Amino acid sequence: MSVVSLFLRGAAVLAASVLIGGAALAQSGPLVTTDWLEKNLEDPKVRVLEVSVEPGVFERGHIPGAQNIVWHTDLVETVSRDIAGPEKFQALARKLGVDKDTTVVLYGDNNNWFAAWGAWVFDIYGLRDNVKLLDGGRKKWELEKRPLATAPASVKASAFTVGKPNTKLRARLTDVLAAVEKTSPARILDIRSPDEFSGKIIAPAGFQELALRAGHIPGSVNVPWARAVNAADGTLKSPEELKKLYAEVGIDGSKPVITSCRIGERSSHSWFILSRVLGYEAANYDGSWTEYGNVVGLPISNPAGTVWGGK
C-alpha cells in the first residue's frame, strides 16, 4: 500500500472516530441537540417522547417516531394527587418500549416544562443516565424547520421492571419545614415569577390550582425558571452562566437544594438543571405552593402585604 493510501486510510479512520466520539459525547450528558436527534431517529434503541403543556399540540405535528405522554394522566395518580405509582409507571414504560438500556429523549413545548417533569419521574424510578432532554424542545425543532409527523408511532413493548423509587429526588412537606426551621442545611429555590414570590398574585392568570394565601416559603430565594433559558431558541444557558445565575442567590452546590413552584412542574425544570446539568444535590418539591400555602398555621413570607388573596 502506498504512503498516500495509508495516509488517506488513516484520515478516514480518524474522521470516523471523531464522528463516533461526537455522537457518544452528545449522548453522555443530560442533553441532546436537534442535529443529533434527527440523525438518530431511526435508531431502534432511541425512544422519543413528547410531554407538552398545550392539549392537542402533539396531534398537530410531532417529531417523527415520537410518542405522546399526557403528564396529568400518565405521570400522576389523578385521585391522590401523587406521581404515578410503581405499577402505573412500569406499565407506561413498557407501553412506550422503554427499558434500562434505551436512550430516552424527552421534549415538549414551553421550553420543556413538562418534559423536565417527565425526566424527574423517570429518574425517581431508576431511569436516569439514558434519559435526556432535547435542548430547546419543540421550539428549537420548529424554528429550524425540521420534519414533523402526524402518524402515531408503533413500537414493541418492553419488559421493563420498575425499581425501588429514589425518594431522595422528591422533597416532602416535612423536608421543607426542616429547611424553614433550619434543622436541615437545605436551601429552598422558588422558581415562580417575582409577582407570585412576593405575594402580589397567587398564580398566573388562567391557572386553576390555587393556594388560599399568597407569598413564599420563609427563607427561600427566587430565580424564575425562565432566566435559565435562552429566549431566542429555548435552549439552556451554558453551565458557566447557570452557575453564576444561581450563585447570585447563594446556591452553589455546597448545600442540598429543594426546588419549588406552584404544583411542581416549573420547579422540575430547575431541578433538572441543578441536578443533571450542574451536578448539585437537588430534590423537587411537587407539593409546592399549593400544598404549603394551604396548610393551616404554617409561616409564610408575604412582602406584598396581601392576606387571603386581598389587601
Image: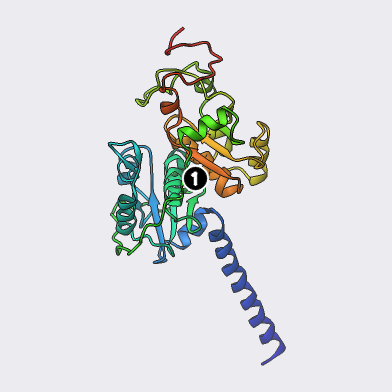
Name the residue furthest bottom.
Answer: 1
278 relative position to 302: left or right? right
Q: Which quadrant of the view contains residue 22?
A: bottom right
Q: Position of residue 163 (x, y in %)?
A: 40, 57
Q: Residue at x 36, y 49 (%)?
A: 62
Q: Residue at x 46, y 58 (%)?
A: 38
Q: Residue at x 28, y 54 (%)?
A: 151
Q: Nearer the viewer, residue 93 or 176?
A: 176
Q: Position of residue 192 (x, y in %)?
A: 51, 28
For the N terminus, which image quadrant? Answer: bottom right
Q: Position of residue 103 (x, y in %)?
A: 45, 60
**Residue on which disc 1 sits:** 169
Q: Nearer the viewer, residue 148 or 303?
A: 303
75 relative position to 3: left or right? left
Q: What is the number of callouts on the image?
A: 1
- Quick check: can you spot residue 113? yes
- Residue 203 vs 284, above or below: the answer is above
Going by the numbered disc 1, the residue's amino acid type is: Leu
Q: Residue at x 59, y 32 (%)?
A: 183
Q: Check disc 1: other Cα within 10 Å, few if <14, some if 14-19, many if 20+.
A: some
Q: Nearer the viewer, residue 109 or 253?
A: 253
Name the residue furthest right.
Answer: 3
Q: How is the image coloured?
A: rainbow
Q: Position of residue 185 (x, y in %)?
A: 62, 36
- Secondary structure beneath dot 1 equals helix
- Residue 265 vs 203, above or below: the answer is below
